[in-house]
Amino acid sequence: MTAFSITRALSGAQGTLLPVLDIVAQRVNDATVPDWCERRGWTDFLLGLSEVELQRCEAEGLAVALPAFRTAPQSLIELASHVLEVGTLPALIAAPAQPTRNELRGVGVRKQRQLATLLGALAPLATPARRIVDVGAGSGHFARLSAAHFGRTTLGLERNPERVASAKSRAQERSNDPQRVSADFAVVDASHESLRFSAGDLAIGLHACGELGDTLVRAVADSGVDLALVSCCLQKITSAERAPLSRAANGFSLRKDTLGLSNLTSQAIGVETSVEHNIRGRQARYALRLLLLARGLEFEPGAEMQGVNRRQAQSGLAAIAQRSLELHRLAPATDVEIAHFESEAKRQFELIRRLSLPRDMLARAIELSVILDRAARLEESGHSVRVATIFERAVTPRNVSLFASRDGARLPRVQGDAT
């Protein structure tokens, strides 16, 4: 088995994306066939998919499902093959930790599994660490658990003062043993304030969003400390475009709206709700867009939900139209309007779902082009790096982990390692 190479994997992800950047750049916002689809001769195949075939593509991913369709265009099959190849990563090998029920009190089930898995994977890095620094600590669950589990001084950095106060309070409540190490927390906006580490630190970023992940990698590369990073929401950046961190990336950059595509995941069962509910919500949001356009408003695609709870869209157009129209100081929608735009949205959205499949298929390649660029930057700074899947997709689709250390022996094992 060929050893996994960061630079080779990065080159593969970029090589897959470069010929199809026109697809990445042109989102399917309405039922109009995009230029990239017509030029490549994919239109008839995509629009000819039955509902059952479409559901299979959405559940498995177009790249996985495509070989079963005898009428699929050869160029689409070849792209799917490249997507599958670059998206294949080794899996982490680590026994999950076993926090107590009291330690996990108030933590959601999916979050519990993430925390236990990451704690188990961190053992080789945490054992020699002098201090654990959780960057973007959020509610403080990981920092609190890692302090208790590893017995190491642990500092959680979070930009939201209310979350910091809550995390401190929770840590004090759970620390009923005065001999036990407990976590401390501080208000720090790592995206805008200087992030510095000391020798012996282990830096953690569990679902560090967008710019925070890049900031964390730069600071680790400069300081030489160890790192465990699970990236999330890559589009959360302040600039219009993300600049690469590594020399190996050869200047390859992606726009903010393109990075948002990396959040898409094909799977048969939704993470927070069913796939059917997710599709119903997307269709309702599209119906709201049609309603607002008919009322004379102009806005960027996606902005129709501004100020409206996205989860309410799963209950249909009526559930979100009233709030949206109130925000725009427009008259409430009539029953006739609701029925009309729900019907029109259903018709158009059937086309949008089919035409979106090739672009959605590129989501993992986009995600990996960023994560592997970060990994390459760390290798260039003298770190040994592991990139591997860490969580099951049913737990969270943001499941690519990056571990880095100047001492390669500290890195967690992955499938394919020599025993």
Image (cartoon, rainbow, N blue to C red):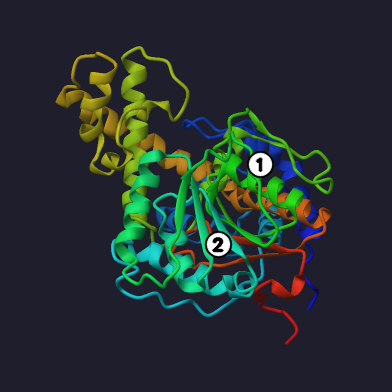
Q: Is residue 124 left or right of residue 324?
A: right
Q: Position of residue 79 (x, y in %)?
A: 70, 53
Which mark, by number, is residue 65?
Answer: 2
Q: Residue furthest left?
A: 335
- Residue 342 drawn above or below residue 63: above
Q: Residue at x 30, y 31 (%)?
A: 308
Q: Is residue 301 left or right of residue 380?
A: left
Q: For numbered disc 2, what is the local secondary structure?
A: helix
What residue is at 19 percent from the left and 15 percent from the top? 331
- Quarter of the picture containing the C terminus is bottom right
Secondary structure at badge 1 equals loop
The answer to which of 331 and 339 lies nearer the viewer is: 331
Residue 104 appears anywhere in the view: yes
Q: Which residue is mark 1?
A: 41
Which quadrant of the view contains residue 382?
Answer: bottom right
In the image, residue 27 above or below residue 375: above
In the foreground, 333 or 139: 139
- How packed mark 2 is, by other alpha carbons closer than 10 Å (few <14, some 14-19, many 20 or more), is some
Answer above or below: position of 335 versus 389.
Answer: above
Say which amino acid is labelled 1.
Gly
Residue 73 visible: no
Residue 307, label in figure:
none
N-terminal-most mark, 1 or 2: 1
Residue pictured at 54% horizontal, 37% vertical:
236
What x and y, as percent, mark residue 121? Answer: 57, 72
- Residue at 18%, 19% in the rendered image: 332
Tell me the quarter of the image containing the N terminus.
bottom right
Count of numbered labels shown in the rendering:
2
**Badge 1: how crowded within 10 Å, few (<14), some, or many (20+)?**
few
Residue 213 placement (x, y as % from top left): 61, 47
